[in-house]
Image (cartoon, helix red, strand yellow):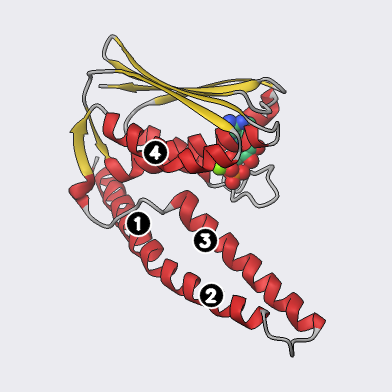
Amino acid sequence: NRDRIMQSERLNVVSELAASVSHEIRNPLTVTSGFLQLLNRSKTLTQEEKEYVELSLQELRRAEKIVSDYLSFAKPQSENMVYSNMNAELEYTKNIIMPYASIHEVEVKFTFNNSLNKHYDRNQIQQCFINLYKNGIEAMKEKGGGTLFIDVSERKQNILIRIQDTGIGMTREEISRLGKPYYSTKEEGTGLGMLMVYSTINKVKGSIEVDSEKGKGTTFLIIIPT
Ligand code: ADP
Ligand code: MG
């Protein structure tokens, strides 16, 4: 028992550390890519030098993506804990991804019908939904668009969150790899989004069911006991 307590304290320290790191790392990333972009406009750079600058910018974008898939909502305060029905987080994150959806011709349909409350970390839950919405949109982007359905309801004492897309879908084999660190089929993917999703849902003692058909689309059903 004591071991377990120690381990969970350690996990808290790690996530608080991660949170401040993400915050501290954003600024230097932004400043550095700004200067590199300026440098890239110089007329005296050789072709080879330009390639180095391009590569550096590309790597900085990758670092930025890792921060935004994994740590963007993390804040080093425990005041993030709330007791609520998740409606505010679902609405907020839906609004955040709307521009991303519309540039990829994705329509978002949102229905909410839940009155059950739950204790959870607001920032982690937000990050988790963002990662799922982003994946849905990215799966439809390759098909030229589609519809993202977000449906929240309750059954007995469980909150049910269904996130459904009409994207490229996954094979059974691909589904089994979800949540493995660095597993990504995307050219510029981090493979950290689903890892974050699984660990967050695990923390609220929830479960995730994945139903997918190649070429047709994917449904994530998240069941959170209250
Ligand atoms: P990333 O998005 O950076 O690739 P993720 O951990 O978010 O990393 O997702 C891992 C992989 O799982 C993706 O590269 C993709 O192949 C697959 N995936 C996740 N969600 C979906 C989805 N809704 N539809 C199809 N494939 C998906
Ligand atoms: Mg992702």
Tell me the residue that label 4 is attached to.
Answer: 95
Residue kind at label 1, given as amino acid type: Val
- Which residue is found at the position 46% from the left and 36% from the top? 198
Q: Is residue 180 visible?
A: no
Q: Residue at x 74, y 87 (%)?
A: 45
Q: Are marks 1 and 3 in contact (CB under 8 Å)?
A: no
Ligand 2 located in image quadrant: top right
- Number of the front mark, 1 or 3: 3
- Number of the front mark, 1 or 4: 4
Cα distance between the residues tagged 1 and 3: 20 Å
In which image quadrant can residue 199 be found? top left
Residue furthest to the top: 156
Disc 2, SS: helix
Closer to the eye: label 1 or 2? 2
Relative image position of residue 179 (x, y in whole percent):
54, 38
Q: Considering only vertical position in the picture, is 72 above or below 180?
A: below
Residue beneath label 1, please?
A: 14
Cβ atoms under marks 2 and 3 closer than 8 Å: no
Quarter-wise, where is residue 184 in the image? top right
Mark 4 vs 3: CB contact within 8 A: no
Q: Secondary structure at mark 1?
A: helix
On residue 34, the disc is 2
In space, the residues marked 2 and 4 are separated at their CA atoms by 28 Å
Residue underneath mark 3: 64
* CB atoms of marks 1 and 4 within 8 Å: no
* Secondary element type, mark 3: helix
Q: Whole-percent x and y of residue 182?
A: 60, 48
- SS for dot 4: helix
Q: Is residue 194 left or right of residue 53?
A: left
Query: Which residue lies at the image location 53% right of the left edge and 75% below the top edge?
Result: 34
Amino acid type at mark 3? Glu
Give me the C-alpha separation between circle 4 and circle 3: 21 Å
